[in-house]
Amino acid sequence: MRCFSTIIFTWLLSVSAVMAQNRTVRGTVTGAGEALPGVSVVIKGTQTGTITNTNGSYEISVPDDKAILVFSFVGYAPLEETVGSRTEIAVSLAIEDRALEEVVVVGYGTQSQRNVTGAVQTVKVAELTDLPVPQMSQKLQGRLAGVQILQTTGKPGAGMSVRIRGQASVSAGNQPLYVVDGFPLSGDISTINPDEIETITVLKDAASTSLYGSRASNGVVMITTKRAKAGETRIGFNAYYGVQQIPSRGIPEMMDAREFSQFMKELHEENNRAVPSEYQHPEQYGKGTNWYDQVTRTAPIQNYSLTIGTGGEKFNTNAVLGYFEQDGVIINTKFKRFSARLNSEYQFNKKIRMGVNLAPTLSIFTGVPTDGGPFTSPNSGLVTSAQLSSPLIAPVNPDGSMPVTAISPGMLPGPNWYRVARDADLTDRSNRLLATAFLEYEPVSGLTLKTSVNAETGQTFFNNYVPSTSGNANVAMPRASGDLTQRNTQFFTWLSENIATYEKDVDEHHFDVTAGFTVQRYRGDMTNITATNFPNDRIRTISAATSFVPTSEIQEWGLVSFLGRINYDFKGKYLLSASLRSDGSSRFGSDNKWGNFPSVSAGWVISEEDFMQNIDAVSLLKLRTSYGVTGNNNIGNYTYFANVGAVNSGATNNYVFDNTLAPGNTVTTLANRTLGWEITRQFDIGFDLGLLGNRLTLGYDYYTKTTDGLLFNVEVPTYTGFSNFQTNIGTFKFWGHELTVSSRNLTGNLKWNTDFNISFLRNRVEKLGTANAFLGGGTSRNITMVGQPIGMLWGYINDGVYMTREDFENSPQFQTSDVGTVKMRDVDEDGVITVDDRAVIGNPNPDFIFGITNNFTWNAFDLSVTAAGSVGNDIMNTALEYTNNLDGVFNVTRAVGGRWKSEQDPGDGIHPRTLAGTTGLFRNANSLWVTDGSYLTLKNISLGYTMRPENLKALKNVRVYASIQQALVLTKYKGSNPEVNTGGENPLSQGLDQGAYPVPRTFTLGLNLGF
Amino acid sequence: MKLKIVITFLGAVLVSGCSNFLNIAPQNFISSENFFETEADFVQAVNATYAPLRTVYNQAYVMGEMRSDNAHYLFNNSNRGNLVREEIADFINNSTAEPAAVKWSGNFRIIAYANEVISRIDEASFIAETVRQNLKGQVLFLRALAYFDLVQYFGDVPLMLTPTAGSADEILDVKSTLPRTPKVTIYEQIVQDGELAASLLPGKAVQEKGRATAGAAKTLLAHVAVVQQQWDKAENLLLEIVNSGEYSLLADYAAVFDPGNKNHAESIFEVQYQQGNLGLQSTFTYTFLPNLTNLSPIAGFQFNNQSIGGWNIPSEDLIAAYETGDKRKAAAITDGYTAADGTFVPQPFIKKYVHLPLPAPNGSSANGNDNWPVYRYADVLLLLAESLNEQGKSGAAGYLNQVRSRAFDSESALITESDPGQLRDLIAKERRIELAFENKRWLDLVRTGRAIETMNAYGAALKASGKHPNLIPQTYQVDANKLLFPIPFNEIKVNPNLEQNPGY
């Protein structure tokens, strides 16, 4: 809580300052022997100040001789000079011992970096402005140790997958808690304009997160938004415009018209079916239609944001307005976001301060569902589905009309995917408003009372009219009628926080105590209507439908918490901290309402010890360790109740007697009165090391944590009448090493900084539900079993093809096997291939992940290169189920041309024959689908040039830059995006690629203006 | 001072508000703590016990009829998603076969719903005695019916007679680890439940249509007795039903299945469906139609039945088994349909459950109004004939001919055979024809010991016909192990104490 006392202190000074007469002081500021432009010069304790010009000189009006000038500039240690009688003050700033004295945001307060005993990493968003991406998490890729940030889809506006220290839960989610200016959000930060953000701090270990109690297990991301700087008025304008292209690497190679026709001809012949005329003369065709090209394009991306900030003595305010627009690289997809944020603070008198922040956003996605498989709901899964269309069919007729279907004889019915994309009528619009207000009161010196009221409300309107001309695989076109899904969701949550902090120095002992309680309440309402049987596609409102099914739902929760923390240090060398949060939640079972989440941590700043003073090379050495308990309360709002309902697993409990509906209600879920949060116990030990005046800094952490009482829907035998039981059972163990290195390689005219981080992440399943029964397995593509890492890839081991009759007869066989069909391995060695021969065939968990950023500046030029990578994880390309289909129902990859045709023409030994009735096994998950998913992605390269125009007084600086996002992806994985993950956030279903929106390469030009 | 006031005030707010704040009752559903408090609650819980019948009987044809020589399927090259149904028909299914899991879990859901009621209703003094008896009788009947289905298809099964509830340990370590109970014990329970139900339930005349009746309970008991070859017991029960006068054969065979005529005089127990999109509709009508991408020639409206239809297609063997002049053939099976171009497509399919105009589909999902006949009077008459014949008693032909005289115009079709061996075959054949596509055939073959021989011969004929090139050599290798279905894979995965049936 030091920040508050500092603010109050400075405020006190300012009060005395305004009383006196003013006079002028001028001078120049130098650093490393050169004039420093842009240095902030502020009269201490006031918000009066100025900035040095291009020559490093300044001029400021001071009230009296006692005034103290504070000179500060990024990268340099701040310097204070008492004015005295001087009228000219020249100062030279020393390069700062970077980061050590910086104040970092922690839970319910701030702390100096030096005193932090937990595992915390901060990123200044100013360093990331050049990245032409709309979401904060995208900008953080490769920047944070121990944080896995994946862009699983290129869909404009789609959320990112963020996992801190590999945290995983079976069903309670693994996304971290996002806290914006102290307010825990109910969702993620995808709708927040990154230009509103000043810093991001990631809290990783239990000591730093445990004050968030039952919501802290997945880690906490603290976001601090921009505030006006004291004593200045600033106007900033940032804009970029760019072009997105799909990189050629990873685009699946499907058969062209001639190859497909040949394939279909041979397939019909092999199965003794009459060859349809379309396939009788393959040589008549050329390339035909490339469906991937048809549904993709090069598309623009643009962003504008305006920041206006002004800081006065009593009042400061900062406004950020933003507009972002991204046309997707899939045709007819688009994302737009309007955002605003207004942060204001008002100082009533020397004891009372208040602030109000308001941040509305509106984001709109329009287009077509793109991700997923071809058999999901109508008009979804476009990326994979389009490629399965017949290359013999043109998407647009010569007369300009569009056919409704794009199949050739024998293929599964399905739509013309080009038309599906063109006709798509999907809107996903969400409004969100964050509003926070606080009142702070300092009754006596060192004691601060703060109360805040925070509210968040959001509305989402989803409207997807799927015209009769749209469908999905295996749907005859056109469909009899279009259909409509319309969903309205709204939520409102309020949080009252009441925090007292007290700071006290007794000799060389420093105490800092925080206590508080908070109350939060949430309510969400959802209505969903699916409407069918529209008379035509022209009127698309619900009232036009003749059949509709409405559903609605209300979700509420309440959370009451008490929290306390004590930080103690002796001589700034020996650091101790302990905290406790007690959470009472409406979600917890009636016999288990309250959970306690304690933590302790300790640090030793060895470099402050006398014996270290002679070792000049070491500027900082701090050892720190922590242990604590956190929870994950994403267990559903009413999970502990036994439902009595009219619906069970999607089936109604109503019945009909005498042709009349008879309502049915009965117990449909099992009660669990002791249901609770998931418990994570985490130990962390690490050090921070600064060498050579902190030109080289290192941070290292080892952690080990155990998540117990995993909430999951334990499968119970269905003879109980239920299929699952929500309970806390099961244990995952996680451990890993994190290393960050930050180096200022060159500090002269050519400056070169390198930031590198690497994280080794491991996990193991220790215990699962009933009989430790594995999760997944069977026909699922992942399996989670005791003793193994989470979510291993699962399927048959593919040993190629039975190449000869002899090979076939001497090998174990599946029921439907024949010579020329796929040969799976007899894992259980019982002489036949059965479902029991499936095995673990890959590990989607990486061995390590890393990121590296190099920044260069030379005169007015700056260059930044960021790369991120992952090593050792496997990916299963499940889209091969469709693109390697051997039934002649889809277009297939060119590689299928190398299939087994006869013993004389046995092909590549990979692709089996197309004999009907034998092909099913090849569609099952198998090791042929699994490849190493390691990658190194050059996330961003930005080159900038900064001007400080002399003749335009109003304009303080102009910077232009060019940037390439997703510049290069190096990987052995054959699919387009090695960060893909069809399973979404589900940690048990990682490493699958069913086909997703491609992640484009983006070339942009940008402009930053400062007034 | 101020601080103290503030803290005291805030503390007071908390203490008073806390407990309510943390008890937020769901608004989307009722919790079990507030249910079973009124008669209406019990009625609804009983209604719900019938609901899983819909799911079970929509798919029961796969194991009950398509497994037999009565029906096959249309090989659907374009949609292999329902491969497991083919595998069941062709005797190459394994334990992951979904229809078996549906039957298993659906029946056990009925049992669990019944147990919720049975465990509470005796204490529910607020319910009038007659109502209480009726409700209890219904759920006892349903529990018996569900166990009877399970025991016939799976053999030994776990015996659940109380609701699954309690502490986490109890649910996970006790209820979820039960072994299979020997089927002799299951049968004892079925008989006990059935007898109690028969004594509690009212007759057909007074019971609401569609609910279980005393007659239904007795038919179930008689069927159980037949399966256990307790012929005299079966005979007595069946005679009680016949002599009650509650039931009679309809004059027209086709009318028995007419959804305009549900719960008629011949009906003893049928699963109630109602068209619409409320989840009450049946889907089997579409399932039994050919897998056309456009159903117009049959349905009169456009509908893609590609991934829905093509199942339970009448076998040539069954079609050939109909005698000349049997009116039931035209009522049960259609020879084919006339395609859009005017040509006749000779593709037989079931007509019994096709009643035009079909209800409009729900988007791309099927929608049907037909009920499923579980027990009807003709079945009772044939069981009675069989029970008499098996005891060497006379009178079997008379009951048999009650059924036949509806099917044939000519009196010459009536059976005069008196040799019990010959009569046994004639009764079996009559059951096959009269009850075709009512899921009786497979279990009849099993209980009469004819399944292995009949199905091997049938499979050999299918393969020899050359019309089913997808039948690989492993198909139709029927042995004693194939008479039971495997315990569903997932069930054993979760509870390894359940021992798998041999051969799977």
Image (cartoon, coloured by chain):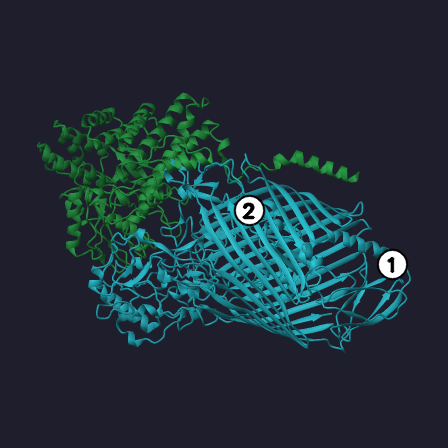
Chain colours: A cyan, B green
Mark 2 nearby-residue class (10 Å; few <14, some 14–19, many ≥20) = many
Amino acid found under the numbered disc labelled 2: Arg
| Image-based side of B112 in relation to A695, left or right | left
Label disc, if present, on residue B341 of the rendered structure: none
Quarter location, residue A17: bottom right
Q: Describe the element under mark 1 as helix, strand or loop.
A: loop
Asked if residue B305 is positioned above or below residue A962 in the image, the reply reads above
Please report whichever mark, 2 or 1, sits nearer to the chain's N-terminal start: 1
Q: Nearer the viewer, residue A907 or A530?
A: A907
Left or right of A862 in this view: B384:
left
Give the label on residue A18, or none: 1
Q: Nearer the viewer, residue B265 or B180?
A: B180
Relative depth, front residue between A19 and B341:
A19
Check disc 1: other Cα within 10 Å, few if <14, some if 14-19, many if 20+: some
Quadrant of the rendered image containing residue A131: bottom right
Q: Amino acid at mark 1?
A: Val
Residue in view at x 61 percent, y 34 percent: B19
Residue name at image x 84 percent, y 57 percent: A14
Query: Numbered disc 2: what chain?
Result: A
Place of residue A604 in the rendered image (x, y in percent of width and height, measured from the top left): 66, 53
Q: Residue at x 27, y 41 (%)?
A: B501
Visible in this render: residue A67? yes
Q: Tell me: A765 left or right of B492.
A: right
Q: Which numbered dot is residue A681?
A: 2
Q: Is residue B465 above or below residue A443?
A: below
- Numbered disc 2: secondary structure: strand
Which percent across, then down, holds residue B48? 40, 35
Question: Which label sits in the foreground, 2 or 1?
Answer: 2
For this rendering, which residue is in front, A411 or A690?
A: A690
**The image quarter in which residue B13 lies:** top right
Instruction: Specify the subunit that label 1 lies on.
Output: A
